[in-house]
Amino acid sequence: MGLNVMNKVMSNKWIIAFYVLPALLLIAILIFVPLILTGYYGLMDWDGIGEMNFIGLENYWNALQDDKFWESAWHSFLLAFFSTLSLIIYLVISLILASKIKGADLLRKIYLIPMLLSSVAIAQLWIKVFNPTNGMLNHILMAIGIENPPAWLAEPSVVLFAIFVPILWQYAGFYILIYYAALKNIPESIVEAARIDGASPLQIAYRIKLPLIMGVVKVTIVLAVVGSLKYFDLIYVMTSGGPNGASEVMASYMYKLAFSSNDFGYGSAIGFLLLIITLIVTVIVRKATATKEEIQY
Amino acid sequence: MKRVGYLILYLCLGIVALFQIFPIIWLFLFSLKDNREIFSGSPFALPSELRWENYLKVWDSGIGTYFWNSLWITAMAILLTVLFASMATFAITRMQWKLNKLVLGLFMVGLMIPIHSAIIPLFSMFLNVNLIDNPWSIVITYTTYNLPITIMILLGFYYTLPREIEEAAIIDGCSINRMFFRIILPMTAPVMSTTVIINMIYNWNEFVFVNTFISSDMYKTLTVGIQNFIGQYMTDWGAIGATLIISVLPILLAFIFFSNKVVEGISASAVKG
């Protein structure tokens, strides 16, 4: 009899609605409706305030022929590529950190600190670091004898690399944290067995530890690639896409179209393409990194 | 030989630690200097005198307002997110209905969305209901966009709650609301605190929503406020340094006191994507 009451209460439609609807309505209205609207606004000629004029696929067609859009997409993909490459550095650091280092816990917490700061604060701090005359970086470079260090954020040829340094700085602790946790999950007995068989530390790292955490590495590749495609705050604050579009990325291009040029229709089309590209790339990267059999231990 | 090897490893790790921490120390140093000292001396020199007046000056000229806005908006959004997410997670994991997997799927899809793709329609929606330049637009946006990650972190814990607790409570004649708020919710305190920390970091650091929806100075939060502020005080490095330190201090303090919770929360949020 008691269980009957229980089942009745726990499947009461009104109570379920009361518990799930606040959250469900919020994400429906503020996440899913806007995503659909983005695609819809992309079909309009619209300045955000005045009347909308339906122009079909013209905005999307224009985007595909817009050099600035492709340039910003190229920069986004470059960032995604650098970010994926930098995972190797994080992996090496994590392997060292997880090899019975004293103070590993404190170190990984220190590494994590930049991750906690806002992108705006990070951007403002690194604007100062890169300052051509009084910044920390050029001070150091001049002290070791380099006479004309570049004005990092003002040179189109180096700006994207310069911007990547604070990105590296910001996310290092995050990825190291993930890898370190995965490495610590490897049973000691496996590593011990390899050691008894005469494997060197390098062999253990490359042949045993790395394959065992490959699942986690794949997740981080997806995170790095997708995260890079969405990149916005830091670049918007540091360079606003400049100089002359040399550090423009997809999100910053879209944002400026809508909120600086008041071209809401075209901006929405780019926003929708950003959504589609992100989803497609997510699927591709997941497929590319998926293996038939997961390693068991 | 082995000693030397370990020494090299420690050296590598030390250099990485220095790279991670040094820009922040440099920032703190110049926040206590004036321009003359910053531009003439070595960037690594300690300040000749500690100019705390940089902090007072920026606090009184607007940063104080931004700080309080950040504080109440962050706190209010955390409260709503954690409450709504806990309720939804409870319904999804503990109650019996057919669509629960579908609803959960919707929340998980919400994890993958690039927010920039939604921002133009969000702006026009808020404009239509007169919520542009109103801090509540920020509160409900933060609340909503943090729901998926919060539910994801809560999920595992709710699945493991023993069913006997609910049975006992209901057979004793406890109403379901009473059971949830008085028994279940307090039991989830450890995982709730993890979500509070994660929400706090996200909300405190968020930039693009405030930058888009808020135009009046009196409603701006720190991230957008310091942007404007630094625009005005372009050349006063000490003031800029003090502003940045103030803006990052609450999160750094939270990290010092709850570092394990922060690590736990950031690891849990990693599955995002």
Image: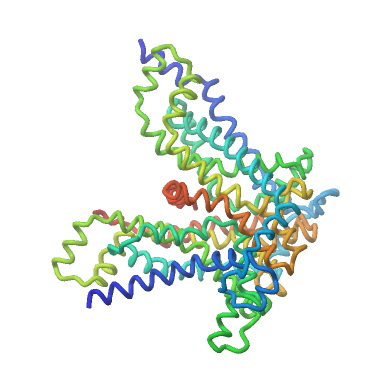
Question: Between residues B176 and B190, which one lies in front from this camera angle?
Answer: B190
Residue drawn at (58%, 77%) of the image: A137
Question: Between residues A23 and A202, which one lies in front from this camera angle?
Answer: A202
Q: Residue furthest right?
A: A50
Residue drawn at (50%, 33%) of the image: B86
In the image: residue B64, left or right of residue B194: right
Q: Quadrant of the C terminus of chain A?
A: bottom left
- Residue A61: percent from left, percent from top: 71, 63
Colouring mode (rainbow / by chain / secondary structure / one colour): rainbow
In the image: residue A224, left or right of residue A56: left
Vertical order, B268 against A71 (above or below): above
- Residue B193: percent from left, percent from top: 47, 39
Question: Between residues B105 and A226, which one lies in front from this camera angle?
Answer: A226
Residue A198 image-quadrant placement: bottom left
- Residue A120: percent from left, percent from top: 64, 59
Question: Between residues B246 and B98, which one lies in front from this camera angle?
Answer: B246
Q: Quadrant of the N terminus of chain A?
A: top left
The answer to whether residue B59 is visible is yes
Residue drawn at (64%, 47%) of the image: A35
- Residue A63: percent from left, percent from top: 70, 64
Residue B79 image-quadrant placement: top right
